[in-house]
Image (spheres, rainbow, N blue to C red):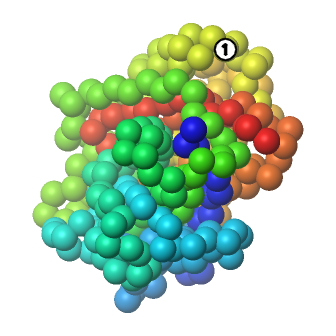
Amino acid sequence: MIGIKKISSYLPETKRSNFDLKERFGINDAFIEKKLGIRNVRIKDKDDETSDLCVKAFMNLKRTMDIDTSKIDCLIVVTQNPDFNLPHVSAIVHKKLGLSTHCAVFDISLGCSGYVYGVSVIKSFMEANNLSHGLLITADPYSKIVDENDKNTTLLFGDGASATYFSTEPIYELGKFSFGTLGEKYSSLLCKNNTLYMDGFEIFNFVTTYIPQDFNLVLELNALKKDDVDLFIFHQGSRYIVDTLRKSLKLPEDRVVFDIEDYGNTVSSSIPIILEKYQDNESVKCIYISGFGVGLSWASGIIHRTQ
């Protein structure tokens, strides 16, 4: 059985305060605290590429567990902001980490749903090909494409990365997952001419329409009730989105995580950054995870603690 062994993340040290942008965008403290829920966003070092963020997340992972890189036989990177148009970022990370030539390496081009897609893909791929040691890395530095004068994006998105180790000795095993796409609304979150555009109204409508339906489907697929789930981790789009989902689904506030006040919406890294903080908490045995955004796509599922 392949599952999650360990998770680590990386956040750049550089912060930009949203409070410093109040005058420029005509906003107040209440908007920052109650609607965004983001006081600061993290910005990568100017000279760092996407692959560098991947490596930094991996090095943090390596500090928490013994890793023999010669045994890693699968590496998947989730990103939509690569170093170059080609080759795939995972090939560059492969070189920087000095991995074996027998290591399977590829990228997944997904945004906010990418981590949930990724954990399902890497588990299936490894089991189908009899692999034993895998890395799933997320890194989507939106500072590459955000217009600093666009209120809809510059206040939200922060840079970050995560590294998740998969093995035959997991602490989390995967339950059943659900996936979906609303391709007709793809232009609601779009990068054109290297600049990000987001229609916040359309994204909000998408999330509040489709994610509650999917939530109930995931519980049904896993033969669970709300009370069986110890923790609910929704993609950290904004405080308003997470709070709206929590209220709509009538979930207890103490079991729905919001945790991006000091770093912002890190796209595909938002869920693993939170999972890292709970991975040593043995009382949290059943976790619901749900990513949604670019595409417009979503992916949700259940993971269970095995030890």
Most foreground residue, 256 or 64: 64
Most foreground residue, 269 or 286: 286
Instruction: Give x and y (percent) for residue 77.
Output: 38, 60
Q: In this view, does 118 lie to the left or right of 168?
A: left
Most foreground residue, 143 or 149: 143
Residue beneath the point at 61% across and 71% down: 67
Quadrant of the frame with the C terminus: top right
Residue beneath the point at 44% across and 51% down: 131
Could you tell me how many numbered marks the image carries? 1
Residue type highlighted by circle 1: Leu
Most foreground residue, 56 or 241: 56
Residue beneath the point at 48% across and 57% down: 134
Element at label 1: loop
Residue beneath the point at 38% across and 73% down: 100
Q: Mark 1 packing: few (<14 Cα in 10 Å), some, or many (20+)? A: some
The furthest residue to the bottom: 47
Confirm whether residue 104 shows in the render. yes
The furthest residue to the left: 193
Confirm whether residue 31 shows in the render. no
Q: In this view, does 38 lie above or below 221?
A: below
Quadrant of the frame with the N terminus: top right
Instruction: Give x and y (percent) for residue 82.
Output: 28, 68
Q: Is residue 104 left or right of residue 266?
A: left
Q: In this view, does 266 lie above or below 126?
A: below
Instruction: Give x and y (percent) for residue 13.
Output: 59, 80
Instruction: Give x and y (percent) for residue 250.
Output: 69, 18
User: In the picture, residue 302 is in which quadrant?
Assistant: top right
Q: Is residue 259 left or right of residue 80?
A: right
* Residue tagged 1: 224
The furthest residue to the right: 283
